[in-house]
Structure formats: C-alpha cells, structure tokens
Amino acid sequence: MTLAIHGLVVSRGIAIGRAVLAASSHLDVSHYYITPEQVGSEVRRLVVARDAVVDEITRLQAGMSRDTPRDLVALLDVHVMLLQDDTLAQAIKGWITDRLYNAEWALVSQLDVLVRQFDEMDDPYLRERKADLEQVVERMLRHMRGAPSPVAPPAPAVRAGAPDDGLVLVAHDLSPADMLQFKHSVFSGFITDVGGKTSHTAIVARSMDIPAVVGVRTASELIKPDDCVIIDGNAGVVIVDPSEAMLDEYRYKQKQGEIERQSLARLRHTPAVTLDGHAVELLANIELPGDTSGARRSGAAGVGLFRSEFLFMGRGGRALPDEQEQYEAYSQAVLGMNGLPVTIRTIDVGADKPLDSGGLRELQPQTHLNPALGLRAIRWCLAEPAMFLTQLRAILRAAALGPVNLLIPMLAHAREIRQTLALIEEARQQLKRQGQPCGPVRLGAMIEIPAAALTLPVFLRHFDFLSIGTNDLIQYTLAIDRADETVAELYDPLHPAVLGLVAATIRACAEAGKPVSVCGEMAGDASMTRLLLGLGLRSFSMHPAQILAIKQEILRSDAAKLKPWAEAVLASETPAELLAKGRAGSGV
Ligand code: PEP
Ligand code: MG
C-alpha cells in the first residue's frame, strides 16, 4: 500500500531507491559495509566481544557476595543465556554474511528486529526481556569500540536485487560521524525519524548534495528493508511503495531537476556581482580536507568554514588526531584551495557532535541535561588546553603553506577571548622554540550566541573578522533545540529578534571596517539571499552545492533597492510575510 509521510526539508532533489535500514535506534554505532573478504574477521570481532562479555558477567557473578539480591543473580543468568543463544548468534551473523554489514551494525539490526517482536508481546515478563537484550548488546558494543574498526569502505557496488535507482538510507537517527562515513557511499538519499533542519546530521546530508528528509518521526518503523521509496527533498515528503504512475511522475521531476542543475553550472565562472555592481564573496563550508575539490569545482572564492571537529569524530577507537595528523589534514585543505583563503574553525564538539569512541571517553565533554548549553566548542578547548594547543600549533604550521583564517566558535565572554588569544600566542611561541615554521593567520570569532551579538565592540576590538553562525544564533535566541524535530516549527530564521541580531552584527562590522560573513545555513538558503544583501552582507559561506543557486539570486538583485525593503522587513512584526511579498515580484 502506498504511504506518504512528511518531514523537514534538508536537502533538495528527488531520490528513488530501495530502503536500507540503519537500525541503531539509540545506540551510537558506526554503520558501514564491509567487503566479502572482511566477513571472517568481522564475525570474529563479534565472537570475541561475545566471549569477553560472557567472561565479564561470569567474573561478576563469581565475585558476588552471599547477600546479593536473588533477582540480580537471576538477571545475570538471563544475560549469559542470551549471549550463548545460538539462534541469536546466527541471526546476527546473517546480517554480516548476507548484507555485508559491519559487526556493530549487524548487532543493532538484529536488536531492532527483536525489539519489535518484544514490543508486540502481551506477556509483561517477556516484554521486559527487551531491556536485557539491549543491555547485553550495549555491553558487546562497548567491547567492540575498544577494537580498531576498518575505515568505512564504500557500500557494495551492486547489492543483489537493487534496482537501477539505487539505495536510500532510513534510520531512526544518525550521528554526524555516521553521516561522514556515508559521505562517499552509494546512497542516493537519506531519511531519519529525528533531527531538525540545522542539526549537524542534516548539515552533513546537505553537504553530500543528495536528497534528504529528517524529522519523519515514524519512518524507520513504517519502512521495511527493501521497500521502494521516493524521497521528495523539495517538499519534505517520503513516499513508500509508490504506484507506477507516481514513479513515472517523480522520475520526470528528477530529470527536470537535473536540467536546472546543468543550467546553473554555466554560472560557475561568472563573478558574483549584483545588478548595481556590488561584488559578493561566495565561500564554501567543508567538513573534511578532501571536500576542497568540491569547493573549487563550485567556483568558491575560498573556504569560509572548515568544521575541523569532523577530524575528531568517527575514529572507531583510535586516539584523537595528534599534531602531525592534524597538520597534514589542514595542509591538504590549504594546498587544495591553491592560494585561496581557508578559514579553519577550531574544534566544536559537544551537543549533537559527540566524540564517539570509547578510547576517548576520558576526554569526552561530559553530557548533561542540556548539552547544547554545556561544555561545548571553545569552552571545552579552554578546559583541555593541551588538546587545544595541539590543534592551534597544527593550524599555525599549515598557515605557512597558504592564507589561513583561524575562527573560534561559541565565544561569549571577554574572559574567554583573552584566554583564547593567550593560547594562540603560546602555541606560536612553542613552535618558535621548536624551530617549526608557521604562518600568519587572520583571527575571527563566530557570532552565534546572543550575548556575543549584544557585545560586539569587545569582539571587534580583538578580532580581524566576524562570522555569524545563524544555526546556533537561532537556537540560542529562541531557546529552540536545533536538532529537535518536535519544536522545528518554532525554529525561525525570520524571527525579528534573530534578524535584529544578524543586522546589528553586519552594521557594526561595516562601521568598524571589518569583514563579516554568514556561515550558518541561512547563507545557503536562496530565499534569504536578497534579505541578507539588503542588510548589507557581502560574504556568504555555504556548502559548495548551494553556491551557484545563491549566485543566481545575487546576479538578479539590486542591492541599493533591496536596502529600504530589508529595513522594512527588519522593522516588521511578521517579516516572513514581507519576505514572501518581496519574492512575489514587488520589484526587489
Ligand atoms: C552555526 O552555528 O551557524 C555554525 C555555522 O556552526 P555549526 O553549524 O557547526 O554549529
Ligand atoms: Mg555553531
């Protein structure tokens, strides 16, 4: 039966394919395909982890005192029984051998199958066994995290039965690290149950430039493996088991989209200048050094945001990258841009971007009830100065190879600014003492906390440029979790308070003669381009895939005419209405 489910638009376009379910509902595990040659070693990892957990529990039982509650002893017996259940072991092995899933993915896939079965049981005692199973799986996963995992290879070239259209990934949730692993995979689209438009998972999906819909709430329950699925990224709709007529219609829309893309490609070498002659800088946001090739292809004038934290994620148990590894990554980005500037943002982990490996647990920012308000980004760096100095040295060394801007996230206090600047100077002195060459950097601060936008003179005194992180600025101004689809309706870039802070930052920079750009998702949203131009913005940083569409808007805009209109939008109680009127052809 055909089914249409609605979610949030993340990345535009149409994808049609067979569903692959990434079954990790709440356990943070890596998902990747292995090669047939790796099946044996992957099954062995599973067996080793299982034996280790049986051993662990047996030792626990042996060490129990006589007064240990009988319930607990019985519970551990159940855990051992589950671990030694041959049917369960075979089923998990099946995901590895038949589907070529990595061991962790196989484990959580089988867990999901069983959890569904448990949920349908009437007997409350049996239903409770679900929790035992989850605990056992979690123990095994913890053991596996300690073992090095192979780096994600691309998905198998052609899976038996896959239609020409390809494969789409369906998940309850995906960590940004998971998304990164899928970056070079064969999936032609993504669907997740949870997540907001500017969650980091959504951002990585957008950077892959493939259709994606998030916040589809029940998708991973309703869609079964191998279901035929259409992802309409333009409308935020997922169609399961479509009719032939629907398939034809969407294949037609897909072709139309391709034609539009090709026509935009002609703008690649056209300078981004408004009708009245204002040059606009279009920069790229990247996650990994290899992304610079896409940035160059899109005609970006440089990298406006290199989210360096992605080097620290998805490491499968390996230690944090040391200075040399980071230096090589930053150098690759700098050299990849061939003389164009690269803005490297210092590590911004925490909140929805956790470090994910067990071996790094002691360095992991502690997760509290409100992680987005916790030890995140620069706060964590200042709490871990040795780690921060390592990163700063690597960036300063890479700056010897080409123009580098150093961007600091999540600053709010003058005290944090002073500490950060002192550490940058210390890193420079350390390199000098070691006789290591390093280059000059321009220093920038992200304006993404309202407190920063309200104390701009402090920032302008200490920094060479500012970059407005609208994703977090919206989150913190409106008290809306950017990753929570249940409040996505209220996550409003056009709220007058948000626009007021963005406009004030642009204005203050113009008055101080300092460059400012927007590097949040607002910069890559073509419906916002005219407004930002009207507010005086002349530098936009976005995923490479969005650059040409934004350039097209710029080429059609007259900045002088947009100014009074943008001021009216800013003063309005309902900016969204004025914006819609402006787009409907009121001359701006
Ligand atoms: C932002 O907050 O707008 C931003 C660019 O940073 P991130 O999305 O990585 O938090
Ligand atoms: Mg941010």
Image: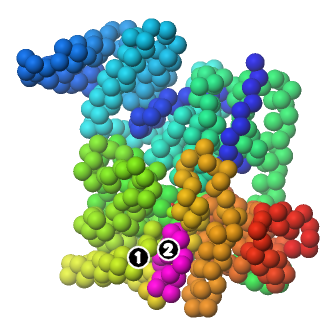
Residue 337: x and y, percent? 53, 69
Numbered disc 2: secondary structure: helix
Q: In this view, does 416 lie above or below 528?
A: below
Cα separation, mark 2 vs mark 1, equals 8 Å
The answer to whether residue 43 is visible is: no
The residue that mark 1 highlights is 413
Q: What stretch is highlighted in magenta?
A: 444-459
The answer to whether residue 585 is visible is: yes
Q: Quadrant of the C terminus?
A: bottom right
Determine the residue positioned at 37% across, 54% down: 312
- Locate residue 528: give its quadrant: bottom right
Q: Which of marks 2 and 1 is nearer the N terminus?
A: 1
Residue 148: x and y, percent? 29, 39
- Asked whether, in this view, residue 99 is left or right of residue 426, the answer is right
The residue that mark 2 highlights is 451
Numbered disc 1: secondary structure: loop
Q: In which quarter of the image is the N terminus?
A: top right
Determine the residue positioned at 33% across, 60% down: 325
- Asked whether, in this view, residue 14 is left or right of residue 290, the answer is right
In contact (CB < 8 Å): disc 2 and disc 1: yes
What amino acid does circle 2 point to?
Ala
Magenta span contains residue 452: yes
Residue 124: x and y, percent? 43, 12
Q: Which residue lies furthest to the bottom in this view?
A: 512
Magenta span contains residue 127: no
Q: In this view, does 498 lie above or below 492?
A: below
Determine the residue positioned at 66% across, 74% down: 500
In the foreground, 495 or 115: 495
What amino acid does circle 1 point to?
His
- Locate residue 102: give its quadrant: top left
Count of numbered circles in the view: 2
- Asked whether, in this view, residue 194 is left or right of residue 325, the answer is right
